[in-house]
Image (cartoon, grey):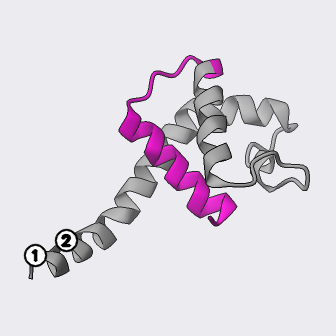
Amino acid sequence: MKKAFLAISLLLATPIVIAGGQGLHDAACMQCHATLMGGDANAIYTRNTRRVKDLNHLNGQVKGCALAAGVAWLPEEHQQVVDYLAKTFYRF
């Protein structure tokens, strides 16, 4: 019973975590990405020459971008942003 409850709780929480990651991402990243990509901030994730190829690299890229943007995310917030990007743009 406990395992079923935990599984259901995790499934229901996933959209909330992704939404939280999107909000953090949009507030901290979109302006810089729009500048870099000529106005289309999301093009940084969909371009043919994108740098990120796996989840480990995505973690490092988010960490580097947060540092460059002067963002002090908690580890949970960092993970929310990584989860949002992985599910929305990278599909891994």
Q: What residue type is labelled 2?
A: Leu
Magenta span dominant secondary structure: helix
Residue drawn 65% across the image and 19% down it: 68
Give percent across and percent down for residue 20: 41, 48
Magenta residues, as a range? 68-92
Q: What residue type is labelled 1?
A: Lys
Q: Mark 2 points at which residue?
A: 6
Is 69 magenta? The answer is: yes
User: How many marks are shown on the rendered structure?
Assistant: 2
Give percent across and percent down for residue 50: 83, 49
Residue drawn 75% across the image and 48% down it: 52
Give percent across and percent down for residue 67: 59, 20
Which residue is more in the foreground, 27 or 8?
A: 8
Return the residue found at the far left.
1
Give percent across and percent down for residue 62: 61, 36
Disc 1 crowd rating (10 Å Cα; few below 14, some 14-19, many 20+) is few
Give the vertical position of 12 relative to 76 (above or below): below
Q: Mark 1 points at which residue?
A: 2
Residue drawn 63% across the image and 36% down it: 60
SS state under label 1 = helix
Disc 2 crowd rating (10 Å Cα; few below 14, some 14-19, many 20+) is few
SS state under label 2 = helix
Q: In this view, does 59 lie to the left or right of 61?
A: left
Position of the N terminus, as image quadrant, is bottom left
Q: Is residue 61 left or right of residue 49?
A: left
Q: In this view, does 55 lie to the left or right of 8?
A: right
Q: Do the residues labelled 1 and 2 touch (CB within 8 Å)?
A: yes
How far apart, in angstroms, are the residues tagged by discs 1 and 2?
A: 6 Å
